[in-house]
Image (tube, grey):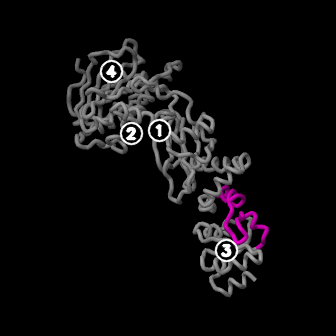
């Protein structure tokens, strides 16, 4: 039975078979995770939709790698599609019919479109859980935009959806057992839903955010290649958002924003610089999980989430100082400059820097709060002036801050503008007479 005659589908733009990324390449070229991420995301949407009508449904996703010339298959036991909904899949996105498609259908459309980044032929086989004795439908799309919708020759035994990718020769390495396992593990190893790869269960256990700190640190070592100084649990107070921050074991520069991970319901959504992490947090890798229902809950304000993440990190650093002073001092010794670099931008951060981050002075390391009791504090960012004044200042017990690192001079210059209680700071003028006069 042919429900939809073969033809060019305006909703599926033609692709150059030589372009493995297609219109939505992103990280979906050979070896990229884009197509796999979208396939798994659509499977999860299908399972969530079924849970709404059957709360007892557990849900499972089965991924089968492409071997022996066969397709890569992603099979979920979610809600499936009715024959009419399968026909809507092959309608142009701008048509009025799409307004009637129940929620979640667009996610499958996205996964089908992305699949053409690695395949010339993509199949969707589905059976609805909402219609008794529903038929199994088969949707076949070609990379040139041709689409065919028919009854499936082999019906599914149970409701759900199966997507089959027939990879082109240039992208077959993307579908091998080893590559598929690596991709799936990276994307869903924090997923509370059971996912199998070639018959092996790879998710569904306790998620990273629910584990004790020692296990979180071990996960960072194994999955991120980072041996963190500390792992900080972050309570953001934003509905559905949880996070942990791994304090990096090496000093970082002002532009370091790599390594962050954003998960949605335990599934990896993005890596690298993140709008959910404040710009000043350059010394941590932050792992954020957004547990909102993407289909029904409103989106969060990313800036508001980033602010809460920042506050949570500061709160955890304070708690760390109270619980493990030696470890806290390691963190401050290594990352005090990163904190001081942005102290004027955030009052809470400035308070932490004033009380706990030591600045280099002619009297040895001193915090701003410690310097506040010494009266007027001199500083210089000129190495020659510092060299000239050090001996006399040390002899006379005068604190001169070594502000030769640019962020320290900026911090001290800005203290008056920040309108906080602290030491009166004066820049030493670069003349020998002034230096000797200040030190006398």
Question: Circle 4 is placed at which residue position?
Answer: 83
- The residue at the point 51 percent across, 49 percent down is 275
x, y percentage for residue 264? Answer: 50, 37
Which label's residue is closer to the chain start, 2 or 1? 2
Question: Circle 2 is placed at which residue position?
Answer: 33
User: In the figure, 349 relative to 291: above or below?
Assistant: below
Q: Is residue 386 visible?
A: yes
Is residue 147 left or right of 85 when viewed as pictured?
left
Are the residues flagged by discs 2 and 1 in contact, CB closer than 8 Å? yes
- Checking the image for residue 361, the label placed there is none
- Checking the image for residue 268, the label placed there is 1
Kindly report the distance in space between the C-alpha atoms of the residues bearing marks 1 and 3: 47 Å
**Which picture quadrant has residue 197?**
top left
- The residue at the point 42 percent across, 33 percent down is 184
Kindly report the distance in space between the C-alpha atoms of the residues bearing marks 4 and 2: 30 Å
Is residue 223 left or right of 366 when viewed as pictured?
left
Kindly report the distance in space between the C-alpha atoms of the residues bearing marks 4 and 1: 32 Å
Are the residues flagged by discs 3 and 2 in contact, CB closer than 8 Å? no
Which label's residue is closer to the chain start, 3 or 2? 2
Extent of the magenta region: 346-375
x, y percentage for residue 230? Answer: 62, 46
């Amino acid at each position: 039975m042919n429900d939809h005659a073969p033809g060019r589908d305006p909703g599926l733009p033609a692709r150059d078979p030589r372009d493995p990324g297609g219109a939505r390449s992103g990280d979906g070229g050979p070896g990229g995770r884009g197509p796999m991420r979208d396939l798994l995301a659509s499977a999860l949407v299908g399972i969530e939709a079924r849970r709404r009508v059957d709360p007892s449904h557990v849900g499972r996703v089965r991924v089968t790698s492409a071997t022996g010339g066969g397709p890569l298959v992603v099979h979920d036991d979610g809600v499936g599609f009715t024959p009419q909904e399968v026909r809507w899949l092959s309608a142009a996105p701008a048509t009025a019919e799409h307004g009637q498609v129940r929620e979640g259908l667009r996610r499958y459309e996205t996964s089908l479109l992305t699949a053409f980044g690695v395949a010339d032929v993509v199949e969707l086989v589905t059976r609805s859980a909402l219609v008794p004795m529903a038929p199994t439908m088969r949707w076949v799309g070609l990379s040139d935009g041709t689409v065919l919708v028919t009854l499936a020759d082999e019906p599914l035994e149970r409701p759900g959806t199966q997507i089959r990718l027939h990879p082109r020769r240039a992208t077959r390495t993307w579908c091998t057992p080893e590559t598929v396992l690596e991709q799936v593990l990276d994307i869903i190893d924090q997923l509370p839903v059971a996912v199998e790869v070639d018959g092996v269960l790879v998710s569904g256990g306790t998620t990273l955010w629910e584990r004790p700190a020692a296990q979180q640190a071990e996960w960072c070592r194994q999955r991120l290649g980072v041996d963190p100084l500390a792992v900080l649990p972050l309570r953001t107070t934003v509905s559905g958002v949880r996070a942990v921050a791994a304090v990096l074991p090496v000093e970082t520069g002002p532009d370091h924003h790599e390594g962050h991970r954003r998960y949605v319901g335990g599934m990896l959504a993005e890596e690298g610089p993140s709008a959910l992490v404040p710009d000043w947090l350059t010394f941590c890798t932050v792992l954020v999980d957004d547990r909102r229902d993407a289909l029904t809950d409103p989106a969060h304000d990313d800036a508001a989430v980033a602010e809460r993440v920042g506050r949570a990190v500061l709160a955890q650093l304070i708690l760390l100082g109270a619980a493990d002073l030696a470890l806290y001092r390691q963190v401050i010794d290594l990352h005090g400059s990163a904190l001081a670099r942005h102290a004027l931008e955030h009052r809470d951060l400035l308070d932490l820097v004033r009380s706990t981050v030591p600045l280099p002075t002619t009297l040895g390391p001193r915090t701003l709060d410690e310097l506040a009791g010494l009266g007027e504090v001199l500083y210089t960012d000129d190495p020659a002036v510092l060299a000239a004044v050090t001996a006399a200042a040390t002899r006379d017990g005068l604190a001169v801050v070594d502000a030769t690192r640019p962020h320290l001079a900026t911090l001290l210059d800005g203290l008056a503008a920040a309108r906080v209680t602290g030491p009166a700071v004066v820049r030493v003028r670069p003349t020998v007479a002034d230096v000797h006069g200040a030190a006398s």
